[in-house]
Amino acid sequence: MRCIALFESVTGAGVKDCVIGDSCLIFVVRPGDAGVAIGRGGSHVRLLRHMFGVNVEVVEYAEDLVDFVKNSFAPARVRQVRVVEKGDSGRVVVVSVEPSDKGVAIGRNGRKAERNRLLVRRYFGVDSVVIT
């Protein structure tokens, strides 16, 4: 709760959730508040990174699964998002990104891909995310 309160006081953005990862804090902000949360030229994120001592990431929430997936993969350019029902094994989200942005979508050592899997599972109950 302290992390959320500090984030809101520094940025002025409304926070929906805070996920504490191994080496980062992920703040899910209300729709339309991502720009305010990041700050001009990333100034708020840099300040918060210094204050918390870990990497700080911002994801804009969306009620729709497809929009949320696109927001969570930003700044990678998402070409298409498909939701595939796999019967007993649940739902799988297949995300197609621009070939030049595939590294951005996956992240170093797959961290960004794993973060996106965690967020989509947490909010929409999706079992797996596949990046193509």
Image: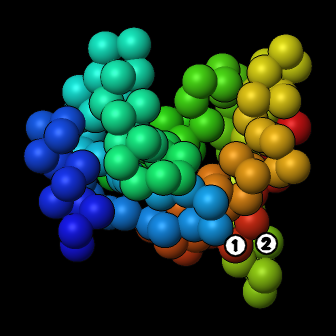
Neighbourhood count class around disc 1 (C-alpha, 10 Å): few under 14, some 14–19, many 20 upward: some
Q: Please state which of the two labelled residues, at mark 2 or mark 1, is closer to the viewer.
A: 1
Q: Residue at x 12, y 38 (%)?
A: 12
Relative horizontal placement of residue 100, taking residue 16 as reference (left or right): right
Residue 120, above or below 58: below
Q: Position of residue 52 (x, y in %)?
A: 40, 54
Relative horizontal placement of residue 38, taking residue 89 as reference (left or right): left
Residue 118 in view:
no
Relative horizontal placement of residue 10, taking residue 100 as reference (left or right): left
Residue 87, above or below 10: below
Q: Which residue is mark 2?
A: 86
Give residue 39's quadrant in the image.
Answer: top left
Q: Residue at x 78, y 82 (%)?
A: 89
Give residue 74's quadrant in the image.
Answer: top right
* Gap between marks 2 and 1 measured at Cα: 10 Å
Q: Position of residue 8 (x, y in %)?
A: 17, 48
**Quadrant occupied by the N terminus:** bottom left
Residue 57, above or below 20: above
Q: Residue at x 63, y 53 (%)?
A: 116
Q: Are marks 2 and 1 in contact (CB under 8 Å)?
A: yes
Q: Position of residue 113 (x, y in %)?
A: 74, 50
Q: Which residue is mark 1?
A: 127
**Quadrant occupied by the C terminus:** top right
The amino acid beneath tag 1 is Asp
Spot the residue most to the bottom: 88
The amino acid beneath tag 2 is Lys
Label 2: which secondary element: loop
